[in-house]
Amino acid sequence: MESHTSHEKSLPHLGDVCPDLVKDVVTLLRESSPGDPIAGSIADLPFHGVCRGYVLTAPKGAPTPSVIELELGDEAVFLLGIDPSHSVVTWVDVLDGRDLRLTLPG
């Protein structure tokens, strides 16, 4: 049986699949919370797919007790689900209607 860890190693990184999304999220995170270590980890998160408009960076159903709202001006553009450790993004919800141009390996 394949372990959860080895499965994640076989998944593409979010930065490879959604480079424009990652760039925008990192920029807004760094503007809203300078020094937050989450910004530096976004590109290396595993891409688990898209479910109901959410970009999953953890298995579907992973606990996300916290949510960070990122704004551009006065408009909320992203919601980030954060795991119980408050250090890992588990999903990204794109609120501004942009096209998620995915670059899938293969």
Image (cartoon, rainbow, N blue to C red):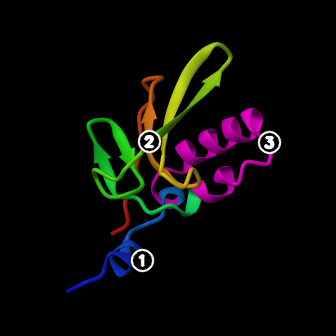
Give the position of the N terminus as an image quadrant: bottom left
Instruction: Return the residue at label 2.
Output: 65
Observer-nearest residue: 40 or 36? Answer: 36
Residue drawn 28% across the image and 52% down it: 60
**N-terminal label among 3 and 2:** 3
Observer-nearest residue: 100 or 42? Answer: 42
Asked where in the image residue 26 lies, by quadrant, the reply is: top right
Residue 106: x percent and y percent? 33, 69
Q: Estimate the spatial distance between the alpha carbons at disc 3 and disc 2, rounded to whole Å.
A: 22 Å
Question: Mark 3 or mark 1, which is nearer to you?
Answer: 3
Residue drawn 64% across the image and 52% down it: 38
Residue type pointed to by label 2? Pro
Residue 81: x percent and y percent? 46, 42
Magenta span: chief secondary structure:
helix
Q: Estimate the spatial distance between the alpha carbons at disc 1 and disc 2, rounded to whole Å.
A: 25 Å
**N-terminal label among 3 and 1:** 1
**N-terminal label among 1 and 2:** 1
Residue 34: numbered disc = 3
Q: Estimate the spatial distance between the alpha carbons at disc 3 and disc 1, rounded to whole Å.
A: 29 Å
Residue 49: numbered disc = none
Q: In this figure, what is the number of numbered marks?
A: 3
**Is 100 inside the magenta-drawn segment?**
no
Residue type pointed to by label 1? Lys
Q: Residue furthest bottom?
A: 1
Segment colored magenta: 16-42
Q: Please tell me whether mark 3 sits on a helix, a strand or a loop.
A: loop
Classify 27 as above or below 19. Answer: above
Residue type pointed to by label 3? Pro
Classify 98 as above or below 5. Answer: above
